[in-house]
Amino acid sequence: MNNTQKIGGFAALIHAAAYVFGIVLAVTLIFPAMDADPGKYIAFVADNQAIVYVWNLVAYWVSAATLVVMALALYERLKAGSPALAQTATVFGLIWAGLIIGSGNLMLRDISVIAELYGHSPAQAQTTWLALEAVENGIVSGNELVGSLWVLLLSIAALRSGGLTRAVNYVGVAFSLAGILTIVPAIGEPMIMIFAPGMIVWSVWVGIVILRTSSNTATRVMNPITA
C-alpha cells in the first residue's frame, strides 16, 4: 500500500511536469505558429516534426500514463472512507486518460501525414489538418469537463474521508468548477486558462501530500511508539 502511494505521489509530480513542459513548448513555439496562419503552421510542422512529436508525446502520452497511476493511487487512498464516490471519480479519471491517449495517438500519426502531404500539396495539407484537428479536439470534447469531474468528485471524496488536506481539496473544487465552466462557449477559453495552470498546482500539491504522508506512515512502522 505504501509503495503504491509513493508511486502515485511521484506520478502526480511527473504529471504536473508534463503539463508544464507541454504548456511552455506550446506557448513559445507551437501556438505562435498555429495562430499566425494555418499554412504557416503546416510549414512549421513539416520543418519541425521532431519538436512537434516530442511535444505531443510528453503533453499527451506521459500526461495520460501518469494520470492513470495517480488516479489508481488516489482511489486506494480514499476508497475506505468514501468508496462509492472514490470509485466514480476514478472512472472519470481513467476515461479522461483514455481520451487524452486517443487524441495524442491521432496527433502523433497526423504529424507525418501532414508533413508528407505538405511536400506534394500545401493546400491539401492545410485542408486535411483542419479536418484532423476537429477530430482531435472532438475526442477530448474541446473542453475540460471529464477531467474536471474527476477532480471535483475526488476532492469531495477526500473531504469526506480526510484522505488529503482540506486546503488541497478546496483548491481542487475551485479549479474543477472552472474546468466545468469550459463547456460554456462564451467563457470557455478564460476558464481553460484557469483550469490548466490550476491542474499543475493541484497535481504538485497532491503529490507532495501523498509522499509526505507515505513517508510519515513508513516512519511510524519502522519506529513504533510504545506507551
Image (cartoon, rainbow, N blue to C red):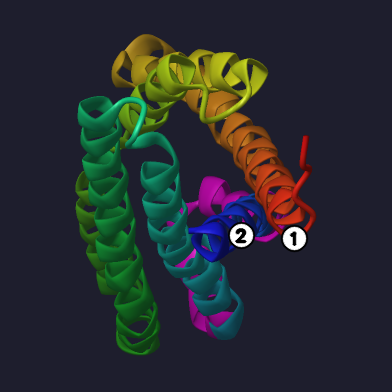
Name the residue that disc number 1 marks: 222
**Residue appearing at x 56%, y 58% in the figure:** 2
- Is 31 positioned to the left or the right of 71 in the image? right
Identify which residue, 42 or 177, lies in the foreground: 177
Which circle's residue, 1 or 2, is located before the other in the chain?
Answer: 2
Amino acid type of disc 2?
Answer: Lys
The secondary structure type at the circle numbered 2 is: helix
- Is 32 positioned to the left or the right of 156 in the image? right
Residue 52: x and y in percent read 54, 73
Residue 43 falls within the magenta-colored stretch: yes
The secondary structure type at the circle numbered 1 is: helix
Residue 199: x and y in percent read 57, 36
Q: Which residues are magenta?
A: 24-49
SS majority, magenta: helix
The circle drawn on residue 56 is: none
Q: How many discs appear?
A: 2
The quarter of the image holding the C terminus is top right
